[in-house]
Image: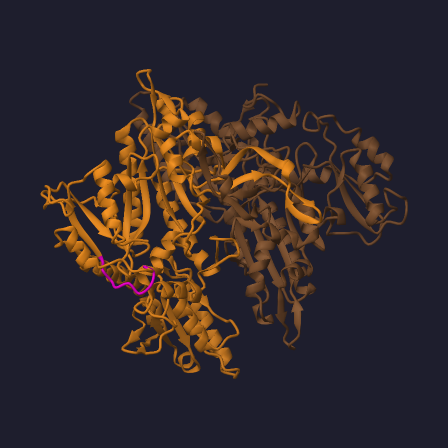
Chain colours: A orange, B brown
Amino acid sequence: MQRALNVTRQANFADWYQAVVRDADMAENSPVRGCMIIKPWGWGVWELIQYGLDTRIKATGHENCYFPLFVPLSFFAKEADHVEGFAKEMAVVTHHRLTTIDGKLQVDPSAELEEPLIVRPTSETIIGDAFNRWVKSYRDLPLLVNQWANVVRWEMRTRLFLRTAEFLWQEGHTAHVDREDAMAETLQSLEMYREFAETVLAMPVIAGEKTEDERFPGADNTFSIEAMMQDGKALQAGTSHYLGEHFAKAQDIKYQSETGELRYAHTTSFGASTRLIGGVIMTHGDDDGLRLPPAIAPRQIVIVPMLRDKPEDADVLAFAQGLATELGETLALKAPIRVLLDKKPLKSADKRWNWVRRGAPIIVEIGPRDAANGVVTFMRRDALRDGDKVASHNLPRADFIAAAPGLLAEIQANLYAEAKARLEANIRTDLKSFDDLAAHFGPAAEDDDAAATFKGWVRASWSKPTGEALDAVVARLKTLKLTIRNAPMDQPATFGPCIFSGEPGVQEILIARAY
Amino acid sequence: MQRALNVTRQANFADWYQAVVRDADMAENSPVRGCMIIKPWGWGVWELIQYGLDTRIKATGHENCYFPLFVPLSFFAKEADHVEGFAKEMAVVTHHRLTTIDGKLQVDPSAELEEPLIVRPTSETIIGDAFNRWVKSYRDLPLLVNQWANVVRWEMRTRLFLRTAEFLWQEGHTAHVDREDAMAETLQSLEMYREFAETVLAMPVIAGEKTEDERFPGADNTFSIEAMMQDGKALQAGTSHYLGEHFAKAQDIKYQSETGELRYAHTTSFGASTRLIGGVIMTHGDDDGLRLPPAIAPRQIVIVPMLRDKPEDADVLAFAQGLATELGETLALKAPIRVLLDKKPLKSADKRWNWVRRGAPIIVEIGPRDAANGVVTFMRRDALRDGDKVASHNLPRADFIAAAPGLLAEIQANLYAEAKARLEANIRTDLKSFDDLAAHFGPAAEDDDAAATFKGWVRASWSKPTGEALDAVVARLKTLKLTIRNAPMDQPATFGPCIFSGEPGVQEILIARAY
């Protein structure tokens, strides 16, 4: 069967992912190692993700600020665990001028900074420094800020959207009077991510707490949402951290309590990034390209006029333009429908397939007969094919306009339902031992990006070892390229024996290969 | 007379500016040299500026993208004029890791980059590299992209919003088939900035072309909008550049024309930044703090309930809440009114003055008597005082709600009219020689930030010298700390003699001290 991409998910999932990113015009590699160029269609998705998250972040009382791109080296030295976690992968600014020496442009050796500056890999330390000035009294708490920013982490192996040296994100940072208030904030942020991922990205996730070895450097507790990609691997799609008093102590963030004592604030942070776009692609894409949930589709309905350099073209264009205008005045998913009349000078068949690969939820094709009869011919990207053939639908113009909001809502719901069914059907709960895990997952592929067989996740009880005992478990899992994703928030009342030790279990965890 | 700030514009304009930025909670200095922290009220203004510009940029067919933060050093070496203009002030990343040596965290000497990376001071070269891949045929042109990004220019002397090492901006980048099309784009962007500044920021400007010595490094023509601050100095508030074929040649951006020849594209760029916020402050602020044009006020109407820990408080709050809700459902300036009910646990007089300093356009105070009588008592920030006293107005509730959209539109118009009158009244056109300039402007103050007397601008004819003759004029002006701002777009039919040489004039220019 002919597909719009030249590689299938089945044949090579990693190659398929690259093909979608390229053919859907989402992003491309840049000449700067590990840094991506986000193209208009990818950026349009990111704008809608930003809008959805920003609205939610503001609705819960957070205010947007902007903090410096650079963090003085000494700030990192203040929080030992934090620097330990990040020191290996940061871009360091050491000079502030170039000069021409022997006719060659180079770094000016006389312009060395007194103190090197780190391009922020995350902003706990630089924002903590501001909190130190802003927090004086219990009346200043909770302090709830957020910023939209670029961050840089030097990565050895990068992949567009999923792992890039520079990426874009929001990072929320908050300070509270005590653990209780800070933990409530941490869980509220986690729930915000879950609701956003499921409602807006149509990406079902499991929210839970990370194990101690997977915590954010400097955190007391780290929570995540984990989504299942179509190769069965897990993608961490958002994290929320309770930082205890660690950063408050490192940055001396103290407040005077109602009773007059000086106390350390309890801080939290939470972040979600352009990685979400990678998650959307690997959740919803198919062998014809991307399928975008209407809530984040920059264009929800694309109208392709079938022009033939003939007199009827004018009628086709007039009909298409009228349709576009009326759709643009119609509400769907609580906003005016984002509609595009694609008038580019390309063959209409090429335009159709471009929009199929880009994942526009509804693609309308208007020919002379449609215009004459007042009929709208359209494809649904969530159900593009009937067998091998492209499934085309017809509706009288007025009926199509009336149906459009419902169609878009249905596509949004269908994409979610499809992904939800895949997630639920692919979490094994019957494995009892490490040997069972090894048998189920099989040996780790040499190149785990390539055609790994779909294995899904395993949910199992464990005895929640700590310290060296946990390290031993992690090392053992690593031999199978497995990781513990999180301990889901919804836990049963009783537990089976620990899958690693056979000791009494105290918690259920998710085990999976992951991005 | 008691004012809400502790320094007046008259006494010391530079100190006054700092006081407004601080007391209006707009921004503060960070511990990172030259980098600012933008606080929620300042960020709220920036979000509205972004929205207004972004809408206009998209309406003219530009698509948003995102390009890497880093530019390889070799890219700068490609365009000689460009690097000459920027090489002196860039942040250079030379290493990608920290390590602990002798117990001290420091740059890992073994992690030096093969090629240093520059933190983008502007993105012509890195975007040009993408254009090289994206432009193949005349069908790909015009190529119209824009990005919202942070950029870094190492500045020796910084001032919040006006000149900071890191700042935020949009940068548009376009490629065209020929000079004509590129120049039309350049002028369209200039006109967009003019219209935006005047309509949204209520900041009158003069659009014109920069002289050759003030061109963007690598540009054939640079255009700017210039605004007059309340100390009489000029602020360049947006620039648009026709780059000719310089960057196309440096980055090999070629296209196949309709007739099959390979030609260089003609490129343009245009940018406006967080500096606009400084312009708004220095255009509209008064000795009580900031006055925000309603179009960019994060909160257009702030309601302060006068609570006294008495039973009537409930009625006051209920009345204020109802008013806030109804105002929030009312349209003003084509959007729902941005209203805030300020319930913070502060004295209501303190809250009033906080909002005066922050420049909320309308401040409503609701006391028990207002609530009982259904009356709204309010102040207009554009006309806060009647003599020394604060001018307070009353309207029945329904009348106030009905009047609110008109009031906000009137405040927007008043602020513009006030600034426009100042601009028009303070451009001298009667000076005939350099001696006249020297007599008018007087010697440059030792510290030109301090209480310089208001001098305004001078508009005069000149003979448009080039090369060394221009350098001589510029040097002479510099002795008076004067610069040529631009040659306004609207030029007369005939010209007086050149103010510098007495030769026949060919163009009128604006001369001023500037930020």
Q: Position of residue A255 (x, y in %)?
A: 37, 22
Relative to residue B466, is residue B25 depicted above or below?
above
Q: Quadrant of residue B510?
A: top right
Residue at (39% x, 65% y) in the render: A20
Q: Is residue B39 left or right of residue B2?
A: left
Q: Position of residue A475 (x, y in %)?
A: 25, 46
Q: Position of residue A380 (x, y in %)?
A: 33, 70
Q: Is residue A364 left or right of residue B274?
A: left
Closest to the observer, B301 or B395: B301
- Where are the magenta residues, as a range? A448-456
Residue A450 lies in the magenta-colored region: yes
Closest to the observer, A512 or A198: A512
Q: Is residue A356 left or right of residue A118?
A: left
Residue B78 lies in the magenta-colored region: no
Closest to the observer, A357 or B286: A357
Residue at (59% x, 26% y) in the render: B287
Q: Quadrant of residue A361?
A: bottom left
Q: Position of residue A175 (x, y in %)?
A: 35, 30
Outermost bottom residue: A310
How many numbered discs sit on the rendered protein? 0
By secondary structure, the bulk of the magenta-drawn segment is best described as loop
Q: Is residue B27 left or right of residue B74?
A: left
Let me know if residue B297 appears in the view. no
Q: Quarter holding the N terminus of chain A?
A: bottom left
Q: Quadrant of residue A271?
A: top left
Relative to residue B471, is residue A306 depicted above or below?
below
Let me know if residue B478 appears in the view. yes
Relative to residue A458, is residue B343 depicted above or below?
above
Outermost right residue: B503
